[in-house]
Image: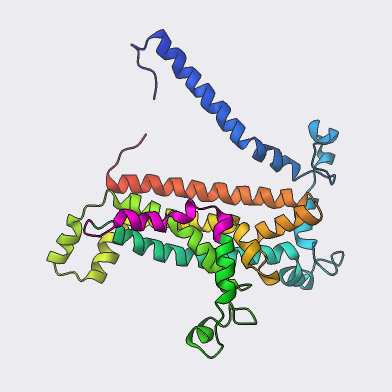
Amino acid sequence: MALPTYATPLERIWYYAFRVICTLIFLFLIAPILVVIPLSFNVEPYFTFTEKMLTLDPEGYSLRWYDALLTFGHPNAEAPRDAEWWSTVWERATWVQAAKNSFWVGIWATILATTLGTIAALGLSRPEMPYRRLIMALLISPMIVPIIIIAVGMSFFFAKACVAPDSAMGMLFGWALSEKGCLANSHLGVIMAHAVLGIPFVIITVTATLSGFDQSLIRAAQSLGANPRTTFFKVIMPLILPGVISGALFAFVTSFDEVVAVLFIAGPDQQTIPRQMFNGIREAISPAILAVATILVVISVALLTTVELLRRRSDRVRGVTGR
């Protein structure tokens, strides 16, 4: 918003000073990212800027650490890069396996968190819902309680939640359980843990969307003969869809970046990207971690941009004018 012509000198000074302060805070927050991205292209195995990098010499930059993401764990990394080589990368490369696990767990955790979170938000949005504040506080508690406490509790719970192979749950989720039939050290356990951490974000975003929802639309649909299923998918869902998608994106990012719960629950076959980065920092520091961090930054920026576009679309659908 531009300054009005009648602004006083003091107001003009504060107008520009406020923007300078905000710019400095923004630069302070993104400074680590601005450092990590160029370092991921360093030709040397260092975490510092070399003289060639500072002088913008092309010989100081390389994609070797991005290539290392494909060759780390490869039994024959120097072989010709034919179809067999790429097949081995897909099956054996450590970072590729971690990425596959992260996307696999993140997608299913997002689906579970979005479904349960949307249902909870719809129930909490109804005025006749008893104890709404208490239930809301319990559902969003994973955002408040330290993650280390949640991870320890889940670890003990999942370790004891063993399922007999011939039981209903064992037959249904046997593919995801560990060899002992327990949720601990299984993909299903990691998915459930990440879903618990993602549900609060879905509840908050969907509840915020429902705050401007006109309940008379539901009564109008019912008066025209629509059953509850038709009312939900034809009236409610199109209006809250931006909030649902935003919550799903936040749940996916939460799952994709989570490391503490994975350290306590996951086994060797459930190594995710954050877990692999943690192992890389603890065991053998390699600039390949910077390459992974850069890729994660790009993914996060793309997802946050999508969330902002969805927010603006939701405001337009609800008739809210923004700046």
Residue 28: image quadrant is top right
Which is nearer the eye, 302 or 45? 45
267 is higher (above) or lower (below) than 149 = below
Locate the N terminus and report the quarter of the image it occupies. Answer: top left
Residue at image coords 76%, 61%:
70
The residue segment tinted magenta is: 127-150
Residue at image coords 78%, 49%:
287
Q: Is residue 58 left or right of residue 11?
A: right
Residue at image coords 33%, 11%:
6
Q: Is residue 99 left or right of residue 243?
A: right
**Magenta region includes residue 128:** yes
56 is higher (above) or lower (below) than 304 = above
- Pinpoint residue 130: horizontal percent, then vertical percent: 25, 60
Confirm whether residue 310 shows in the render: yes
**Magenta region includes residue 44:** no
- Pinpoint residue 69: horizontal percent, then vertical percent: 75, 58
Residue 231: image quadrant is bottom left
Confirm whether residue 242 shows in the render: no
Residue 147: image quadrant is bottom right
- Pinpoint residue 139: horizontal percent, then vertical percent: 41, 58
Q: Is residue 318 left or right of residue 32?
A: left
- Pinpoint residue 118: horizontal percent, then vertical percent: 37, 61
